[in-house]
Image (cartoon, rainbow, N blue to C red):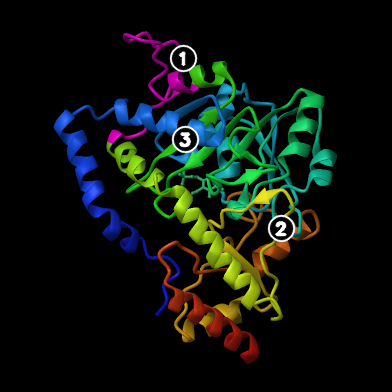
Amino acid sequence: MIPFLDLKRQHAVLKAELMAAAERVIDASAFVLGPDGRALESELARLCGAPHGVGVGSGTDALRLALTALGVGPGDEVITPAFSFVASATTIVMAGAKPVFVDVDHDTLTLDVAALERALTPRTKVIMPVHLYGHPAAMDRITALARARGLAVLEDAAQAVGATWQGRPIGGWGDAACLSFYPTKNLGACGDAGMLLTTRDDVAEHVRLLRHHGDSGRYQHVELGYCTRLDELQAALLRVKVRRLREWEDRRRSIAAEYLEALAHLPLELPFERAGARHVYHLFTVRHPQRDALVAALGELGVGTAVHYPRTVPGQPLFGEDGQARWPEAWRAAREVLSLPCFPELTEAEVAGVIDAVRRACKSL
Ligand SMILES: Cc1ncc(COP(=O)(O)O)c(C=O)c1O
């Protein structure tokens, strides 16, 4: 069996370093808002070209608090793609605002900029592009459009740490961005963790307050806050991993290059890297009109796969919109996408095994 993802392999290699980092934190016994958290904030802010990093409990919390810090509340609209992980939209609802779903570009499954322009209203406050699967959204056009209309941009970079657009890292293009360190992400913690990146001093300061009970210092609680700080143990473990991030990205890209070449002539739509993008292949996602049959055939051939995502966001029972006519690209993607194994520890024999199985499975359909 070739697994879709096997995190145990990464942790086996790093075990001694991870245990030493955990031991250091336990010995120091500073578990909340300590030195490793601060160091990780600086390391990731630098990597993503943003002046500030603010560690929080999850990527979801980073989005949620960023929206409030950007002034989003009841009566406001936030534009978000119809095809993403559900948290891109639920955080808008949590902030008291209305998610306005926009269709995605067929090739990259990121925000369709023309559709985005059509969705703007006087109530639009923030545009939230999602760098889905590790492919950056068209940040030059999105930020130019936002600037011309006085709107803020919040990048959902949960899947895309390390990606670049026109040579500039994602995470530093907009007013703010979220990173997720959910264990399966390219930079994954050993539990939940996340970070807000921001180019704005006021947003950094506000999220620091919001993550810690609205405390402006010494038990002065100036507004309704939350309890969602980056765990110090997770920060220390992530600092071990962040040193490998570039090497892991290169390996993901080289696996992707092998798949792209070997699967090019099959009746399968392959991921697309737009000119100017550096895709970090958090997921290597192909498309096929008989997706479910292909999943079954690959399973029989011993290849693990996953579907990201089987429904559009507005099509989730929570939002309850069918949406085939309003968001046709998102709707089609939800029926066709299928992610193949693409993680740095995959062996060359396994990559060859996936290629062979995909060829055979396509032929059998
Ligand atoms: C696109 C996207 N946005 C937001 C999130 C939320 O991140 P987290 O799971 O760390 O809360 C995730 C990942 O889970 C995601 O993939």
Q: Residues within 10 Å of mark 3 (few under 14, many from 20)?
A: many
Q: Quadrant of residue 322?
A: bottom right
Q: Position of residue 240 (x, y in %)?
A: 33, 44
Prevailing secondary structure of the magenta residues: loop
Q: Which residue is mark 2?
A: 330
Q: Is residue 130 visible?
A: no
Pick whichever of labels 2 and 1 is earlier in the sequence.
1
Q: Looking at this view, is 282 or 202 the one in front?
A: 282
Decide if residue 325 is on the left or right side of residue 52.
Answer: right
Q: Quadrant of residue 118?
A: top right
Vertical arrangement, residue 4 with respect to residue 218, above or below:
below
3D distance between C-alphas at marks 1 and 3: 28 Å
Three-letter code, disc 2: Ala
Between circles 2 and 3, the one closer to the viewer is 3
Q: Residues within 10 Å of mark 2 (few under 14, many from 20)?
A: many
Between circles 1 and 3, the one closer to the viewer is 3
Residue 298 is inside the magenta segment: no
Three-letter code, disc 3: Leu
Q: Position of residue 28 (x, y in %)?
A: 17, 29
Three-letter code, disc 1: Glu
- x 47%, y 78%: residue: 303
Q: Which residue is mark 3?
A: 44
- x 17%, y 40%: residue: 23
Between circles 2 and 1, the one closer to the viewer is 2
| Image quarter (top left, top right, bottom left or bottom right) of the N terminus | bottom left
Q: Which residue is mark 1?
A: 223
